Amino acid sequence: MLAKEIKPGAMVVHNGAPCLIESVTVQSPSARGGATLYKFRARNVVTKAKVDITLKGTEGLDGADFRKRDVSIMYADQESVHLMDSETYEQYEAALEDVADEMKWVAEGAEGVVAMIYNDECVGIQVPATVALKIAQCEPGVKGNSATGRTKPLTLETGAIVHGPEYLAEGEVIKVDTRTGEFLGRA
C-alpha cells in the first residue's frame, strides 16, 4: 500500500509486526521538489505499544494478513479467554492479560465483540463503543441530595467501577462508554 492510500483503521506490517493505524497527518513542504510526508500514529496489536511511522508519498507498507471476526465469548479461565466465531463456529483463544482492559466491559452473552485475527491467532478483541451493564453494587441515594451534580462510584456486573449520578440504584441498567469509562445514561 502506498502511503497516500493508508487510512485510519487500516492494518499494516511495520518492522515485522501488525500495526493498526490510528491517525494520519499529511505534511506538504513549500519548497520546490519537496516530497509530501505522511506521518502515521499506529498501535502494535501484539504488544499494544504506540508506533510513529513517517513515509514519503511514494513509499509504502505491506498490508497485514489480518481479519476481524464477530465472536461470542464462551468462557474465561485463569490464563485465557475462549471465543467462538459467530459464523463458522471456529474457536479462538486470547491471553487474558492481553484483553483484560476490554473484558471489564463484556458481560455474559454480550454481542458486538470483534476478534482481531492475525496469522490465524487471536491477538486482541474490540468491544462496542457503548455497552449496557447492570449495576451490581452502589451506595443508596439520599432523598434531597440531587440539587448538585454529585456522583458516586457504581460497581457494575463485570466488576468495573464507573462514576454516576446519585439517583441510580442497584439493579438498574446503565450505558457506559467503553473508550473512556464514563457513564452515559440509563439504558
Image (cartoon, grey):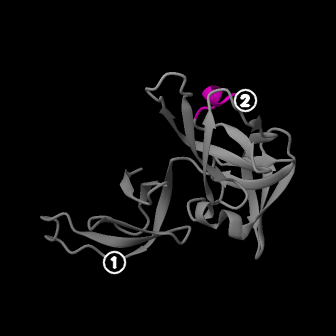
What residue is rendered at 54% in x and 28% in y? 36
In the image, taking residue 33 as reference, residue 63 lies left or right, namely: right
In the image, taking residue 128 as reference, residue 27 lies left or right, namely: left
**Which residue lies most toward the front here?**
32
Residue 115 is situated, as x and y percent measured from the top left of the image, at 72, 49
On the image, which quarter does residue 33 sit in? top right
Residue 4 located within the stretch drawn in magenta: yes
What residue is rendered at 77% in x and 68% in y? 80
Residue 26 is situated, as x and y percent measured from the top left of the image, at 50, 32
What residue is rendered at 79% in x and 47% in y? 117
Residue 113 is situated, as x and y percent measured from the top left of the image, at 65, 48
Residue pointed to by mark 1: 139
Frontmost residue, 99 versus 108: 99
Q: Earlier in the sequence, mark 1 or mark 2?
A: 2
**For the N terminus, which image quadrant?**
top right
Q: How many marks?
A: 2
Q: What stretch is highlighted in magenta?
A: 1-7
Task: Give the class, few, some or many, for how many residues have Cα within 10 Å of label 2's Cα (few <14, many ≥20).
Answer: few
In this rendering, the answer to whether 75 lies above or below 78 is above
Residue pointed to by mark 2: 1
Q: Which amino acid does label 2 sit on?
A: Met
Dot 1: element: loop
Mark-to-mark CA distance, 1 and 2? 54 Å
From the viewer's perspective, is the residue at label 1 or at label 2 nearer? 2
Frontmost residue, 186 versus 21: 21
On the image, which quarter does residue 92 sit in? bottom right
Residue 49 is situated, as x and y percent measured from the top left of the image, at 63, 60
Q: Which amino acid does label 1 sit on?
A: Glu
In this rendering, the answer to whether 108 lies above or below 24 is below
Residue 187 located within the stretch drawn in magenta: no
